[in-house]
Image (tube, coloured by chain):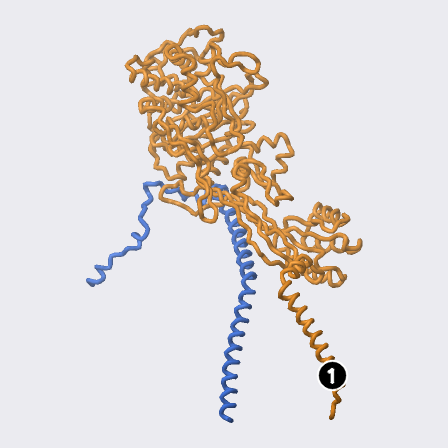
Chain colours: A blue, B orange
Amino acid sequence: MKEMIIQSICSMVCVGSYFLSYIDKQNQLTYLRMQIPQVEQEIIELKEEIAELKYDIDQFESPSNLLDIAQLPEFSHLQYPFMQDILSLQEGLAMHTDHSDRLQR
Amino acid sequence: MFVSSSDRKRLLVVCVFLSALFSLLIGKFYQIQIVEQEKWERLANLQHKRFLVEPFRRGSFYSNTSIKKGHPENPQKLVYDAPRIHVFVNPNAFSLQQKQVITCALSRRLLLEEKQIDAMKKQLHVKSKLRRILSWLEPTLQEKIETWWKGFAKQNHLPKNALHFLKEYKRYYPFGSMLGPLLHTVQERRNPLTHRAVPTGGLELQFHLYLTGKPGKKWIYRSSRNALGKSVLVEPPEHGADVYLTINHYIQTIAEKKLEEGVKKAQAKGGWLVIMDPYSGDILSIAQYPFFDPSSYAKYFSDPVKQEATKLKAVTDAFEPASIFKVITMTLALQANQDALAQGKAALFDPHEKIPTKNIRFPKTRFRLKDGVERRFMNMYLAIQKSANVYTGLIMQRMLETYGAHWIREQYVERFRLGKKTGIEVPAEHPGMVPTPGKLHPNGKLEWSHATPYSLAIGHNILVNSIQMIQVYAAIANGGYLVQPTIIKEIVKEGKVVFTPKKKAPKKILDAYAVRETKAGLKYATKKRGTSPRGAIRGYSEAGKSGTSEKIIQGKYSQSKYFSVFCGFAPAENPAFVMLVVLDEPKKVFIPGVGKNHMGGTSAAPIFSAVAEEALHYLGVDPDDPNNQDWKQETEELIRLYKEWNGL
């Protein structure tokens, strides 16, 4: 009789703990779900801030500004490169290195 | 304790009664909360929730950053939509004193100007539940205002929602007035019914449906305890599509800078310039001066003089092309040569042929076509070099006698697509005008009289827009193909291409012989003893022709107002671009050592040279004439021939 009572108490405690942890998990998920709209809003605001910064950068780096700066004596040495001076490589080819000579050493 | 049966019965009745009441209550709860849940939720939302529009971001325009071969750059935005906030209040909720405090507090915190403070005071004193007191503020100021308002509302026992904010997007232009007449803008006030932007013109109008998105929805709690502004987005907005242009912002800047300098130097009323890729038809630049700054559009539209700057004149205005049209006459004659030979007939003329040009009278015409200097003999190359009127008229006479007036008109319209819109994706394109034999002007006179072909030959009695002219010169530059000019590469929405321009396939209109000979003639024009040596480009070969036409004022040719024009391409072989420069009313004055300022060779040609040199450097095109010796020998030979033929 005593054992039965102890067994039933133990099983009730186990079941109760299980339900408690389940409800706790659900609460955590609900909390996160409630956070999502706020995080989404923050992302939107960050994106808009990035766009505003990009706008400021574009204003400074506008071709009109760059053309004026290019006229200054300190930048007179800069030239546009001609096509014959540009070497174009396929992507990845420039990263390829030959290790065979290292192995020989 | 013993309970009697009557008491027990009474007890039972009371218990049953209370249980029944309790059951009724549970039943009612069940009915309201479970069965009629949706109905009461809807009613509660109507009372407490209010739906607001979440604005969308209008599509942007992007520059073409892939024109430098082997050197692509990141996409470059030409216009930004930045979020801004409007401040709304309920003026009926405030007393007079409170209104004064609000005005002082906001103007102090936001450092407002006099005009803004006056406008705010005016709105605060209107008897209304909703007025906008401040517009287009930066979002960072919202927190400042909210912090002050919370304290003020609590102190004065005002409803928190008596002040709230509304978000809206505003157009900003990082490059200022660049491409103003092409892009245009949208008005500050949206359509109150559709909540959509109202474009002022240009590409904003042409592609309005693509640029426009769909507003989203958000709800806010409407109660005195909760300030409006805390909201939940239930339906995100659908942002507008982005338009990718063929125009390169760097070449555009070069064009605008040099055009402005050239217009000011020539003391002209204004000018415009178009640069096009002769092989693809992509417009690389379309510049105009005076500039139009779309961010202050109201100043332009409220002034009839300034309003002219909002029109994209390269597309909307047609003009008499004058001498640059002589090249088309020669090209047509050369092509007619080839067609005649192919049919086993004799050629109309030989470009090397020595043709007498002195004392020439054209049949059935009263007016006499003259050159500035009377010459005894010319050939085609000399005629282009010196821009000879009589020689060109004689070539036209041969075509007229062989094929007739209808054939000539048909060639201009069907072969060169003059008198028809090019289909460029800009509103209000002028189709131009090619006179029609037998048709009458509104004043009752014939469009095509006996004298018409001869004036047509030298670029009068015809109206063309700048895109039509550049399209024809591109055919000479690219080996004989008429390409479709375009300003749009594609329109993209959420990563997917939703529009690509329907371009006509390039049509072969000139054969190699006609192209080769015309190009040779054009090369002489920018060399020694040509009409436009100021169009020569340092380090590069070029081919081009200048022109000067009297403006038509109230139906008559003006003797003081002109269009000064230059059209050409560079390098002469495998050209990177073809360019047309037009100056509107350059000052009619003689410059010692240079010539007449209003002539195309004097004022328009240098702009071509300046823009072309810098643009070719930017594109990385290798100089094909580093020592400026191109065509020197041929030019000396032509000068010798001219002297020999004309006894000089």
Say left or right for A21 vs B159: left
| Element type at mark 1 | helix
Query: Image height check: is A83 above or below A17?
Result: above
Residue closest to the far left: A104
Q: Residue at x 61, y 49 (%)?
A: B168
Specify the quadrant that holds the N terminus of chain B.
bottom right
Q: Position of residue B576 (x, y in %)?
A: 38, 34
**Amino acid type, label 1:** Lys
The one of B433 and B351 positioned closer to us in this rendering: B433
Q: Position of residue B530 (x, y in %)?
A: 40, 21
Q: Position of residue A26 (x, y in %)?
A: 53, 71
Numbered marks: total: 1
Answer yes or no: is residue B250 visible.
Answer: no
The one of B335 and B582 positioned closer to us in this rendering: B335
Query: Image height check: is B26 above or below A16?
Result: above
The one of B257 and B323 positioned closer to us in this rendering: B323
Quarter of image, res A77: top left
Give the letter of the chain under mark 1.
B
Q: Position of residue B210 (x, y in %)?
A: 51, 42
Quarter of image, res B297: top right
- Crowding around mark 1 (Cα neighbors within 10 Å: few <14, some 14 to 19, many 20+) is few
Say left or right for B329 vs B119: left
Answer yes or no: is residue B575 visible.
Answer: yes
Q: Residue at x 75, y 47 (%)?
A: B122
Specify the quadrant that holds the C terminus of chain B.
top left
The residue where tag 1 is placed is B9
Residue closest to the far right: B96
Say left or right for B218 vs B153: left
Quarter of image, res B471: top left
